Amino acid sequence: MVHDNEITNKSKNRPFEDILQARMSRRNLLAKSVMLSAGGFVTVVAGNQLQQAIAHPGRERHELRNRRGFWRRRSRLLGFEAVKVADGNGPVPVISPDYEYQVLIPWGTPIQPGGPEYDGDPNTRPTADEQAQQVGIGHDGMWFFPIRERSYHGMLAINHEFGRNSHVLGKDDPESLDDVRLSQHAHGVSVVEIKKGRFNGRWQVVGSHNARRIHVNTPVTFSGPVAGHPLLQTPAGNSPLGTVNNCSNGYTPWGTYLTCEENFNGYFGATDEWTITEAQERYGFTENGFGYGWEKFDPRFDLSKVEYENEENRFGWVVEIDPMDASQTPVKRTALGRFKHEGVALTIGRGRRVVCYMGDDQRFDYIYKFVSARNWRRMRAEGISPLDEGKLYVAKFNDDGTGEWLELTIDNPLLAAKFKDQAEVLTYARLAADELGATPMDRPEWTTIASNQYVYCSLTNNSRRTETNAANPLAPNPDGHIIRWRDTDSHVGTTFTWDIFVIAEDTHGTEESFSDPDGLWADPQGRLFIQTDGGQKDGLNNQMLVADTRTGQIRRLFTGVTGDEITGLTVTPDQRTMFINTQHPGNGDPTLTNFPAPQGSAKIPRDCTFVIVRKNHGIVGS
Ligand code: FEO
Ligand code: CA
Ligand code: CA
Ligand code: CA
C-alpha cells in the first residue's frame, strides 16, 4: 500500500529516540559489522550482538557466521530450487520449478456460483450492487478455515485493502453516489467457500450458506472498553457501518477471523472549512484524504460535517468475523486499541491468556501487544470475549538488546493528565503511546510467532529516518529489515530481548535479494515466509521468499507480476496447499500486464489469489 508514507508522529519520542539513543550512523554501523566479520560475508547485525561483539568479538563472529555467508550450514528446511533473480520479473508470475500455482478468486468473482461476474473488460465495470455480490479488490491478509479439519474444503476469509479509483471505477474521481458505492463495496472482506476438485485437483468457489461480503456499508458493532462511549457517537445518530482498508489479519483459537483496519484516514476528506484536531492530525487526516472523493457524495466521510463528528473514530480497529456464520455481525474489538492496524498475530501465553502482537504501519510508529485478562477458555465460558478485557502495551526497544512493554492505562499518571478515561486512551492509542516514550519504528508491518517462540516483525522501510537507534539501525532505511524478540514469562511479561534477523540491504546483489519485507508467516517447522511490497533491487518484481530461521538462509519461491505486491498467506491444515495474493498487479494498468487474463488480451489486470502446491505433494516451503 502506497499511503503509509507520511509522518504523523511529531511526539518527543522521535527526537529523543533519534538523537539521544542513536549514536551510530549507518556508515559506522556497517563499517563495524564488516570489521567484525573480516574473512566472511556477514549481514546480520543485532543491537545486542553488536554491543557484545565490541566486547567479545570472537564469540560474536561465531554467532554471526551461522546466519549468512560462507560458513553457513546447509538448510535442511529449504529443499526447493529457487526462482533466480534473473527470472523474477515480467508481466506474469514465476514459481520455483518444484512448485505449481493456480489462480483463484480474482476481483469480480461471484461469491456464489452463478452470481454476477466481472472479468476485467476495460470498457465496463461492475455496478455497486454487483460488486456487493463479488470478491472485492486489493486482496491482502486472509485465512483458511477448514470444514471438519479437511485440507480440501473450507471457508476462505480475505481482506480487500484498497483499490484506486482509476482501477475500480475507470476514472480518477467519482461522479455520483453510485460511483462511491462501487468503490466502497470493492473494499472490506469476502468470505467464500472453496473446495478442491477430487479428480482435477483444482480449487473452486462452491455454493455456501455462509459466503458473504462485508464492506464499508455493512452493519457492525463495537465491544470492549470503548463500546457505548461518546467518542463513538455522532450527532446524526447513525448506526455504525463498515470496515475499510483491511490490511493483514489474524485468527483466534475459537475459530474466528480478525481483519485489521489500516489506512482508514485516507477515505475521509472535507468539502468545507474544518479545524483539524490534535488526534485527527496524529492519525493523518487531511482535506483530500487519498483522493477517493467519498466525502463529495457520502457525508459520513466528510470531516467538515458536524453531524458526522466522531465518525472517523469508528475506524482503525481490529474486527472479529465468524467465517462459519454469515448471520453474525462483525465486532470491532476496542480493547486492542485504535491505530493503523497492519495485522495481528495471536498466541496463547502463560495462564492460557490470549496474546496479540500488532504493528502500526506508519513511519515512526509503534509495535503493540494485548494480553487478555484471564484464561481464554474460562472467559468464553463466562460469556466474555478474551479480546474485550485485558491490557494493551506499546514497545520500547533499548539499545542494549532488551525491551519493555509499557502499559497504556489510565492508571498511569502520565496518561491520566491527558485523557479522561480508558476509552480515550484506547481510541487515541497513538497519542497515549507518545506520552510513554515508545520507540518509533521503521513502519511495523506483519508480525508472526515462530516455533522458537521468537516474534518476527517486518519493518518495511523508512526513507525519512535521519538518525539511527539499535532497533532501527539504518538512516535512511529504504529497503527495511526484520526484527525479532522473545518475551519473558511466556508472552505475558513486560520485558523482552530482541535482535535483528535480517537487513534487506545486505541481501542485494546476491540470489537472496529482497527489499521492503511486509507479509510474514512462520511455519511450525522453522521456516519464515517473507513477502515483499516495494521497489525490489536487482530487477526483481515483488516476491515471496522462505528463510530458515536457524541458519538464516533465504530462498525465493515465487515472484509476482509487474507493479504488484505479494501479500496474504494461509495454508490448509496439512500445509500441502498454500494461498497467497497479488495485490494491484500492474497498478491496474493493462499496458503493463493483463494478468490473470492472457497477455495481449487488453483485459485490465485483477488482484487474485494463488493456490500453491509442491509438485511432489510435499509441504509448502520444503
Ligand atoms: Fe497494508 Fe502496511 O500494508
Ligand atoms: Ca498493500
Ligand atoms: Ca502490508
Ligand atoms: Ca507495505
Image (cartoon, grey):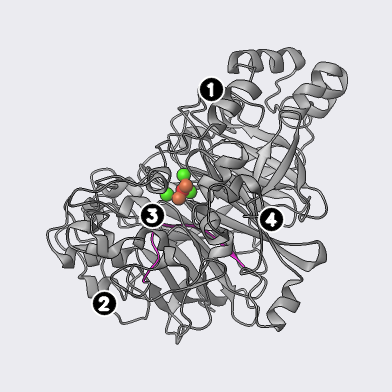
Q: Residue reaching furthest left?
A: 175
- Residue highlighted by disc 3: 264
- The dot on residue 488 is none
Q: Mark 4 vs mark 1: give the one in front.
A: 1
Give the mark nearer the N terminus: 4 vs 2. Answer: 2
Q: Is mark 4 within 8 Å of ligand 3?
A: no
Q: CA distance from mark 3 to mark 2?
A: 28 Å
Q: Mark 2 vs mark 1: give the one in front.
A: 1
- Residue highlighted by disc 1: 475
Foreground of the two, 319 or 113: 319
Verify CB contact (< 8 Å) between mark 2 and mark 1.
no
Q: CA distance from mark 2 to mark 1?
A: 50 Å
Q: Circle 4: is it few (<14), some (14-19), or many (20+) Cα within 10 Å?
A: some
Q: CA distance from mark 3 to mark 4?
A: 30 Å
- Residue highlighted by disc 4: 523
- Residue highlighted by disc 2: 116
Foreground of the two, 164 or 488: 488
Give the mark nearer the N terminus: 3 vs 2. Answer: 2
Q: CA distance from mark 4 to mark 2?
A: 37 Å
Give the mark nearer the N terminus: 3 vs 4. Answer: 3
Figure quadrant of residue 296 = bottom left
Residue 616 lies, with reference to residue 270, above or below; the image says: below
Residue 12 visible in the shown view? yes
Counting from the top left corner in percent of width and height, residue 590 is at: 24, 48
Give the mark nearer the N terminus: 4 vs 1. Answer: 1
Q: Is residue 243 rendered magenta in the image? A: yes
Look at the numbered disc 1 and give the secondary structure of its residue: loop
Count of numbered circles in the view: 4
The amino acid type, in three-letter code, at marker 3 is Phe
The amino acid type, in three-letter code, at marker 1 is Ala
The amino acid type, in three-letter code, at marker 4 is Asp
